[in-house]
Image (cartoon, coloured by chain):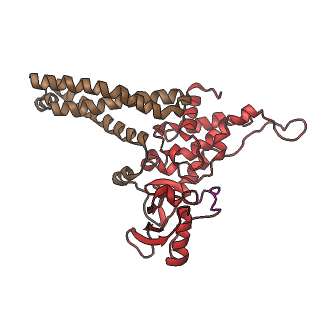
Chain colours: A brown, B red
Amino acid sequence: MGLKRNVGLAVALRYKGKTPFWSYILHRIGGSALFTFFTIYIMALAGVDFASGILGNWLFQIFSLSFGLFHIINGLRITILDLFPNLIRRQREAIWLEWAVFLPLYGFMLFVVFRSAVGG
Amino acid sequence: MEVTLKIFRYNPEVDKKWHYETYSIEAEETDRILDLLEKVKGHVDGTLSFRRSCAHGVCGSDALRINGRNYLACKTLVRDVGHKITVEPLLGLKVIKDLIVDMEPFFNNYKKVLPYFINESPLPADGKERLQSPEDRARFDETTKCILCAACTTSCPSYWGNESYLGPAALVTAHRFIFDSRDEAASQRLEILSETNGVARCHTIFNCTMACPRDIKITKAIGELKMAMVTGKLD
């Protein structure tokens, strides 16, 4: 009977949720980025050559650290809202605050990565 | 004014795959999307299938995805969504025909939270109603407004990924009874909500709150349930 309920990624991403929905998407990508980063980091510690190469690549560093940083800050926002449900009415401000914390840290992180990439 | 209405169509007896059909119809800015669907069904294509009942935002039958977001078709005006309108069935539930989805899994989840008043204590001495202060009544006032339209549950990515997740509508109903000072089954319901597919699957995404046609602060209600589970307190 009828079509299946499956919601594919393409259909899900077309749903017009607002900022918190996109934060959720970025949060999921961030979780995967952190998982990838730590997997490669552990492999590098174990002496796997190609893992050390990937870890030293500045594009990889920017990718994993950007999404990882967002994941951490967004996770803090969600935890705070979960612990204090009364703050949920201020969720819009919470997202602005999240970006206000994220952007300077992100800028600083880019600066450090580029400086070490250029400086060798 | 002419409106372009693109409607999701699927007839399991004829179609192997779903498709869209586009209709150009005359409409006013103040027409509701439900009026447009009625116009198509009444004057253009009588085979179009969709649910409707009261048509005044009370019964919750006509929740649909309109221009990519969940709304009640009877509460959404043309001027709210523009002149190019795409109407699709709710996500995460099987499509039976055109815009009609199978609500069975939604109501099965709803039943799991014991959506009825439980109080085994004897009635008050006068044999009449169990009294409650206005403050106690206000505690769960917001969650009494749910009309079970499923707009919230079917806007939730956690539900899209897992049909067994209770979903926002069931959690709102659980909130309505858990915080009712006259009800005696709060701990039983909190036990149900603490299971794998309970409240922990809410990732505070807010799609449900934004989709609710009754403006219930669903994410806040779920947040209160999370805290009640952690602290065991119902204040």
Q: Per the image, is B31 magenta?
A: no
- Please tell me whether the stretch drawn in magenta is mainly helix, strand or loop: loop
- Residue B143 position by quadrant: top right
Up the image or down, B170 lies above or below B229; here it is below
Which residue is found at the position 65% from the left and 46% from the top? B145
Where residue B159 sits: x, y (%)? 47, 47
Classify the position of the C terminus of chain A by image quarter.
Answer: top left
Where residue B48 sits: x, y (%)? 50, 72
Regarding residue A46, the answer to whether it shows in the image is: no
Q: Is residue B124 left or right of residue B166?
A: right
Q: In this view, does A56 lie to the left or right of B58?
A: left
Q: Per the image, is B59 magenta?
A: yes
Q: Which of B186 and A46 is in front in this view?
A: B186
Outermost residue, front direction?
B1
Q: Nearer the viewer, residue B167 or B6?
A: B6
Which residue is found at the position 44% from the left and 57% from the top? B67
Where residue A106 sits: x, y (%)? 28, 27
Which residue is found at the position 51% from the left and 32% from the top? A90
Up the image or down, B142 lies above or below B111; here it is above
User: Magenta segment, which residues?
Assistant: B54-61
- Residue B183 position by quadrant: top right
The count of marks equals 0
Where residue A94 sits: x, y (%)? 45, 30
Q: Which of A113 and A83 is in front in this view?
A: A113
Regarding residue A110, the answer to whether it shows in the image is: yes
